[in-house]
Amino acid sequence: MQHPPQLRIAATYMRGGTSKGVFFRLQDLPEAVQQPGPQRDAFFLRVIGSPDPYEKHTDGMGGATSSTSKIVVVSTSNRKDYDVDYLFGQVSIDKPFIDWSGNCGNLTAAVGAFAIESGLVNRQKIPENGTATINIWQTNIQKAIVAHVPIIHHKVQETGDFELDGVTFPAAEIKIEFMDPADSTQALFPTGNPKDTLTVPDIGSFDVTMITAGIPTVFLRARDIGYTGTELQDAINTNPDALATFETIRAHAALKMGLISDIGEAAGRQHTPKIAFVAPAAAYVSSSKKQIEQHDIDLLVRALSMGKLHHAMMGTAAVAIGTAAAIEGTLLYEAAGAVPRETVTFGHPSGTLTVGAKASLAATGWQVDKAIMSRSARVLMEGYIRVPFIDK
């Protein structure tokens, strides 16, 4: 029996922040894959190697974690004032679906660099030396992002001495601005309140902060669910009961936030909302054995992504953290000492991260103009990917 040959598609494997993903130019994809639908999902699932019941991604480009099972598609933008459009897909590891409902803040750091090196940005915008300002339209969430990419000799500068906890080696710093990062279809706080009570059948009632900045996220106090906020991955990810509890709480939060209309829909929307727990600043030892002192940070945050505790922090969740910490009445404002601030440094399993956000109270409620953070990115491999795929 004859079988069709693999497709050969131009692709780039990149690290952005504490994540990795496979990057494509839209124009290089098969025509059937350039539009939303089953063909697109089937193609990208095969690229990553999902669904994989072994949860190893041996037969694909995925890394078998939520941080490394990602797809990015970039194209020249037809929108006025934007250079490129950026589409993100979070690929499930053991299930046959891709969640297109949100952004990846970490991989955002690589989008500008990829666009420049792939010829998607007008060369007049690239200085000989200095910084290229790339205006990105994030198509998943319909939001603007500005990437400040360092340039040397008309090329993206990837090497440098900027250190990012959760990434082993230093690289060049890329500053990212998330403009008006709240969900435009919802209020910054979907219920109108910076703090609510969430009741979850058979589990309990909890104070929560539910916010849409960066990515829809529900925050709980660590102590209310039996944790300290200093936990590393093994403390959560090796405990099936704990993971099931978090998922149940997340599902009920999604319902209260109006993201789903039935609790059963949460299983097909794993990327959003995120769930995280917070605590006041305390000393701990990070996953790299780095000592984090209490005075190094303003608060502690641990977040789950795609059902597992993240090894560091999702970039979009960092936007939610920075925004919530700036607003009086939230659990994060409380945990960070209940003082006004426009930047916050928080401790996560791999170390610390600082994010800036400016929020203001308008007649229609709280709003945030932008959130700012620094990440880094670099190309790991470029060339062609081979995909066993039938373009029907």
Image (tube, rainbow, N blue to C red):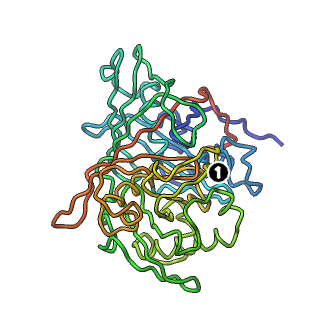
Q: Quadrant of residue 298?
A: bottom left
Mark 1 Cα-neighbour bin, 10 Å: few <14, some 14–19, many ≥20: many
**Above or below 375: residue 97:** below
Residues 346 and 281: in front is: 281
Residue 383: % across, % down: 60, 26
**Taking the image as drawn, is residue 390 in sight?**
no
Q: Quadrant of residue 368?
A: bottom left
Which quadrant, please, contains the N terminus? top right
Residues 291 and 128: in front is: 291
**Above or below 308: residue 120:** above
Q: For the point 41% across and 80% down, which residue is it?
A: 197
**Above or below 371: residue 210:** below
**Taking the image as drawn, is residue 223 in sight?**
yes
Label 1 sits on a secondary structure element that is loop
Q: Quick one: which residue is furthest to the right in this view?
A: 1
Residue 122: % across, % down: 33, 24
Residues 39 and 313: in front is: 313
Q: Is residue 283 left or right of residue 64?
A: left
- Counting every numbered tag in the picture gives 1
Q: Quick one: which residue is furthest to the left in this view?
A: 363
Residue 102: % across, % down: 45, 55
Q: Which residue is mark 1?
A: 65
Q: Quick one: which residue is furthest to the bottom in this view?
A: 202
Q: For the point 59% across and 86% down, which residue is it?
A: 202
Q: For the point 75% across and 57% down, which residue is it?
A: 53
Residue 251: % across, % down: 52, 73
Q: For the point 42% across and 76% down, which residue is it?
A: 256
Amino acid type shown at disc 1: Thr
